[in-house]
Image: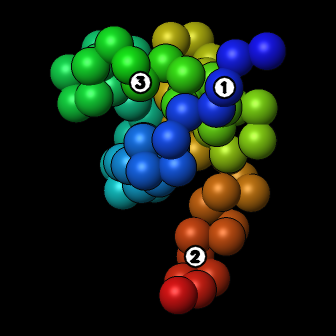
């Protein structure tokens, strides 16, 4: 089993996806922003049901958006 990506990278990837919503991100967008090491973070966030990767577009899930809207500290 592969180790999870760092919380810092996962937070940055999810933060970008939330910031760009409702626009979805492309894999090229993420690669440009974070380099090739971004994929483990994307897979981890998908596994946690926080990101959705569909039709070559990456976007936050409804659960991630709902939590983000609560604006918790």
The residue at the point 50 percent across, 12 percent down is 56
Q: Give me the disc on residue 38.
A: 3
Q: Nearer the viewer, mark 3 or mark 2?
A: 3
**Where residue 62 sits: x, y (%)?**
71, 53
Residue underneath mark 2: 69
* Foreground of the two, 73 or 64: 73
Label located before the other in sequence (1 or 3) = 1
Q: Earlier in the sequence, mark 3 or mark 2?
A: 3
Q: Is residue 33 above or below residue 64?
A: above
Residue contact between numbered discs 1 and 3, judged by CB atoms under 8 Å: no
Distance between the alpha carbons at the discs numbered 1 and 3 = 13 Å
On residue 3, the disc is 1
As measured in the structure, the alpha-carbon distance from the residue carrying label 1 to the one carrying label 2 is 29 Å
Location of residue 42 in the rendering, given as x and y in whole percent from the top left corner: 55, 28
Q: Which structural element holds mark 3?
A: helix
Element marked by disc 1:
loop
Q: Quadrant of the N terminus?
A: top right
Of mark 1 and mark 2, the one earlier in the sequence is 1
Q: Is residue 2 left or right of residue 14?
A: right
Q: Residues within 10 Å of mark 2 (few under 14, many from 20)?
A: few
Which callout, 1 or 2, points to the residue nearer the camera?
A: 1
Q: Which mark is residue 46?
A: none
Image side of residue 6 versus residue 36, left or right: right
| Mark 1: few/some/many CA within 10 Å (<14, 14-19, 20+) | few
The residues bearing labels 3 and 2 have C-alpha atoms spaced at a distance of 25 Å
Residue at the (76%, 41%) spot, across then down: 48
Classify residue 27 by image quadrant. top left
Q: How is the image coloured?
A: rainbow
């Amino acid at each position: 089993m592969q180790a999870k990506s760092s919380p810092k990278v996962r937070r940055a990837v999810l933060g970008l996806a939330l910031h760009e919503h409702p626009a979805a991100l492309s894999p090229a967008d993420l690669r440009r922003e974070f380099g090739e090491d971004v994929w483990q973070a994307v897979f981890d966030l998908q596994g946690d049901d926080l990101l959705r990767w569909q039709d070559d577009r990456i976007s936050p899930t409804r659960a991630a958006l709902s939590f983000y809207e609560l604006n918790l500290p």
